[in-house]
Image (cartoon, grey):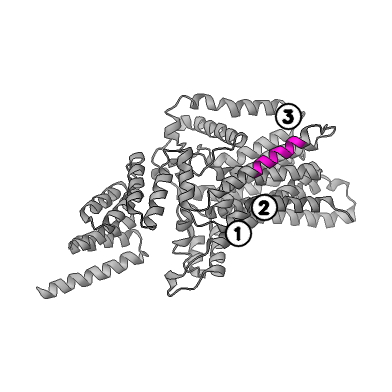
């Protein structure tokens, strides 16, 4: 029996795999060290330590499902070394996990579009648009992007199962009584799987809290069920999402954000972000992990008062055409729902660097894929130039993604690329400083740190790292100044407290050093390095006293 959709799925996998296969050879980059390599809860990844990640947020995010996935990879791939902390990690399996889940997401988008369009080739083109667009490179090629692709996987699975449930429910009145009981069990099964997947999506990344609204839009404007039917079916998902939204905001309080956007201008910031995303989708030529598009920056320019007109005008056109093409409402709505938590209407920590980021678009591209799939599947659609134009578009996107993925091979390559498209990127300057310092290129690292500090003078982490270089050069007094400045800006920085204590030990000020070690341990009671330094400092103090 011929099943064309299986062959199409195979072609899709081959095309996407050939584009992204190179990422398997890439290295760890920036946040990968915080999230995995230097994460005390994953090195080693024992059950009690991983359990801690289910009890509380880590680095401002409660994403225990993602950390559990990383823990599993650590346990399977960690290479034995002479000591527990000396065990090394191979980045290859982590990159492979991102790629495999992205391929699964490709198939899920294909399945969703087949369900909604009833057209295999149209669904395949839409799925390719989702998987091959260059903005997807960041979450796929960056190990820390697992939270986006994993949350995307569970979100897409939840949508697929929910839509299957909704379609079965809309036709249930026509079923015979005997078949109705069996069908009822199947419907409950689909809804149960969808709900479980939704919870796992929230546990992978809490931005999935907007999924009920995305599902509602697809149900209402594509499946054409009544408002009451859609709302009743999804109201339980809304209640599930609330605790995760509250926990996320509690983990990223406004007090921890450098520039708190006034409430009245937040819609303008959101409009600017949407306009920026529309441009990046249409012209994906200058992509990177940092656009430095902070609220403070955009408020200094007049464009913020005009940028919102583009997405607003597009939304008006879509709404006016809702009777002829209702799927456009669903497509636009899904696109916005995926971005809503990160548009700046509610402040979040990464806004200190940029409101916009490619990885925030990962799930939202389902809306773009749906638009293409529905457009191509419209009845009486004359193929004409549509097919060759679609082929050219998807080929262009695939080539751009393959080229973009190369920049993510290692930190130095990535951040040098960022500086080409955004010379004022604090993230790139401090990232290059970290990478070069690790390679022993002290002078170059110091130059990048100093540039980063000209951009953000109050950044405690950069001052701490600059202090480390100066301490390595035995310029202890200069290093001490940097550590003190870091602590002035961030008093609860346990690392700076510990490093300042180390310098004070070198200068012979043991009493002050012990005080700073104790402060570091008060901030982080599990800071073993500070505990070891304290022990050595106390022993040295006792030795000196015994010689008096």
- The mark lying in front, picked from 2 and 3, is 2
Q: Main secondary structure of the magenta part?
A: helix
- Residue 191: within the magenta? no
- What separation in Å lies between label 2 and label 3 (alpha carbons)? 38 Å
- The residue nearer to you, when weighing 348 against 143, is 143
Residue 123 image point, x, y percent: 76, 44
**Residue 10 against residue 124 in the figure, above or below:** below
**Residue 542 against residue 172 in the figure, above or below:** below
> Where is mark 1, residue-wise?
96
Residues drawn in magenta: 388-398
> Where is mark 3, residue-wise?
322
- What separation in Å lies between label 1 and label 2 (alpha carbons)? 13 Å
Residue 541 image point, x, y percent: 18, 69
- Disc 2 packing (10 Å; few <14; some 14–19; many ≥20): few
In this view of the protein, can residue 213 be seen by the observer? no
Tell me if label 1 and label 2 are in contact, CB under 8 Å: no
Residue 487 image point, x, y percent: 29, 50
- Disc 3 packing (10 Å; few <14; some 14–19; many ≥20): some
Q: Quadrant of the N terminus?
A: bottom right
- Element carrying mark 2: helix
- What separation in Å lies between label 3 and label 1 (alpha carbons)? 41 Å
């Amino acid at each position: 029996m011929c099943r064309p959709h299986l062959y199409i799925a195979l072609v899709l996998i081959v095309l996407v795999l050939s584009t992204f296969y190179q990422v398997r050879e890439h290295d760890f980059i920036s946040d990968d060290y915080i999230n995995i390599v230097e994460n005390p809860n994953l090195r080693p990844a024992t059950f009690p330590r991983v359990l801690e990640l289910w009890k509380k947020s880590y680095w401002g995010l409660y994403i225990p499902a993602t950390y559990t996935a990383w823990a599993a990879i650590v346990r399977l791939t960690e290479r034995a070394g002479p000591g527990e902390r000396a065990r090394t990690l191979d980045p290859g399996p982590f990159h492979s996990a991102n790629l495999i889940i992205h391929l699964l997401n490709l198939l899920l988008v294909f399945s969703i579009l087949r369900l909604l369009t009833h057209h295999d080739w149209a669904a395949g083109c839409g799925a390719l648009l989702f998987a091959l667009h260059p903005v997807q490179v960041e979450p796929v090629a960056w190990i820390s992007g697992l939270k986006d692709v994993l949350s995307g996987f569970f979100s897409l699975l939840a949508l697929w199962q929910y839509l299957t449930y909704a379609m079965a429910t809309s036709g249930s009145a026509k079923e015979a009584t005997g078949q109705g009981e069996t069908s009822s069990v199947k419907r409950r099964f689909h809804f149960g799987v969808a709900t479980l997947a939704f919870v796992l999506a929230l546990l992978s990344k809490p931005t999935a809290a907007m999924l009920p609204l995305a599902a509602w839009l697809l149900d209402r404007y594509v499946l054409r069920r009544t408002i009451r039917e859609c709302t009743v079916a999804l109201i339980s998902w809304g209640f599930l999402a609330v605790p995760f939204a509250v926990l996320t905001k509690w983990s990223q309080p406004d007090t921890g954000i450098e520039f708190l956007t006034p409430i009245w201008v937040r819609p303008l910031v959101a409009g600017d972000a949407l306009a920026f995303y529309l441009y990046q989708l249409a012209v994906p030529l200058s992509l990177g992990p940092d656009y430095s598009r902070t609220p403070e920056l955009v408020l200094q320019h007049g464009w913020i008062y005009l940028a919102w007109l583009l997405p607003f005008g597009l939304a008006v056109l879509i709404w006016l055409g809702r009777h002829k093409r209702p799927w456009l409402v669903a497509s636009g709505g899904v696109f916005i729902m995926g971005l809503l938590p990160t548009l700046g209407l509610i402040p979040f920590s990464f806004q200190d660097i940029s409101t916009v980021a490619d990885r925030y678009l990962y799930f939202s591209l389902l809306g773009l894929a749906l638009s293409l799939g529905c457009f191509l599947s419209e009845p009486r659609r004359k193929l004409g130039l549509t097919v060759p134009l679609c082929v050219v578009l998807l080929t262009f996107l695939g080539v751009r993604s393959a080229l973009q993925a190369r920049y993510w091979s290692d930190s130095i390559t990535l951040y040098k690329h960022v500086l080409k498209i955004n010379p004022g990127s604090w993230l790139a300057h401090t990232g290059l400083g970290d990478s070069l310092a690790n390679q022993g290129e002290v002078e170059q690292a110091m130059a990048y740190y100093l540039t980063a500090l000209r951009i953000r003078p109050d950044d405690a982490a950069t001052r701490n790292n600059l202090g480390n270089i100066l301490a390595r050069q035995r310029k202890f007094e200069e290093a001490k100044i940097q550590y003190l400045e870091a602590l002035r800006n961030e008093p609860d920085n346990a690392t700076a407290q510990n490093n300042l204590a180390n310098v004070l030990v070198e200068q012979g000020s043991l009493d002050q050093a012990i005080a700073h070690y104790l402060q570091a341990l008060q901030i982080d009671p599990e800071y073993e390095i500070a505990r070891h330094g304290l022990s050595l400092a106390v022993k040295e103090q006792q030795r000196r006293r015994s010689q008096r």
